[in-house]
Amino acid sequence: MKKRIGIIGGSGLYEIDGVNILERVTLETPFGLPSDTFVIGELEGREVVFLPRHGMGHRLTPTDINYRANIWGMKALGVEWLLSVSAVGSYKKELKPTDMVIVDQFIDRTRNRENTFFGEGLVAHVMFAHPVCGGMTAAIEKAATEAGLADRVHNGGTYVCMEGPAFSTKAESKMFKALGMDVIGMTNITEARLAREAEICFATLAMVTDYDCWIDDDPDEVVNVEMVLQNLSKNVQNAKKMIRHTILNIDTAQRNCECATALQNAIITHREAIPQVTKEKMDLLVGKYL
């Protein structure tokens, strides 16, 4: 199978410009159904797999997304690099609506998610100190310059992931700002954890839509749904430019990062103690190590 680059599209992003569609694939996984059909396409010789995170028409809340099925499906289709595009609120004035942030750290505030492939008699603990692939973030940073968006794209930032679907209370918003968070969203930490377990290189391009609700002195900046939707529309066009250049910048010749061998020393369970049914279920991820 050809090495592929995966794109998970967030709110408002349902296609990638310039990609020649080759096929659409509907998958069932050991963890259930993914959010939607996977679209496999080609861009200047590189094969791309696209999936709308919330389903076409935005049918799934952040909690209802089957993250395990989505990432498993990407792995099954040969994806080795995964770019996640996500709408976020900002905690810093310099991270303005319609700007983008190349996230490098996460704080997990979710509580109702299945966020690991492991269990059922098989235990693994992956290293996750650096949750984002350095090679991919470099490709995104280069893409910003090539797309003429260097002044709108910020390299580095911490993404706090809340459960949703409601936005923050003012108290939560002010707390996260005081703690030094950069942006807030509802999806990406779960994708990042699962991608690492699947040994997929992962990066997030966070599209700022608003300032959440920590601002008191400017009523025009207080978050509301209309503002979010307007800025989403503006962001999507720039995001498409960024995605195109990022795809072409990823070094697909080799992977020397920790993402590629995350499970090599992570499996703790004695091999003879792993149930056969679990070995068979998890063969896509751990078969080469067992």
Image: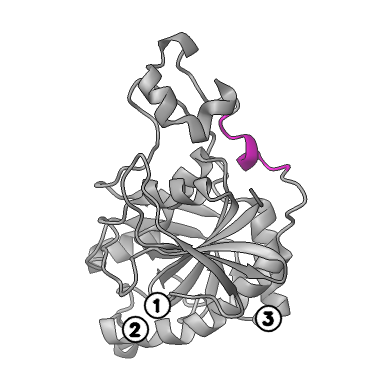
Q: Is residue 6 left or right of residue 89?
A: right
Residue at 36% across / 62% down in the picture?
A: 36
Viewer-nearest residue: 93 or 203: 203
- Residue 123 visible somewhere in the drawing: no
Mark 1 vs mark 2: give the one in front.
Answer: 1
- The reply to whether the C-beta atoms of the residues labelled 1 and 2 are less than 8 Å apart is yes
Q: Residues within 10 Å of mark 1 (few under 14, many from 20)?
A: some
- Earlier sequence position, callout 3 versus callout 2: 3
Colour setting: one colour
- 253 and 134: which is toward the camera: 253
**Residue at the spot of label 2:** 229
Residue at far top of view? 272
Distance from the alpha carbon under mark 1 to that under mark 2? 8 Å
Q: Is residue 240 above or below residue 165?
A: below
Which residues make up the magenta segment?
256-263
Residue 222 sits above or below residue 120 on the image: below
Q: Secondary structure at mark 3?
A: loop
Quadrant holding the C terminus:
top right
Q: Position of residue 196 (x, y in %)?
A: 52, 42
What crowding class fits label 2: few (fewer than 14 Cα within 10 Å), some (14-19), or many (20 or more)? some
Type of amino acid at the residue the image marks with label 3? Ala
The numbered dot on residue 147 is: 3
- Which residue lies under the disc numbered 1? 12
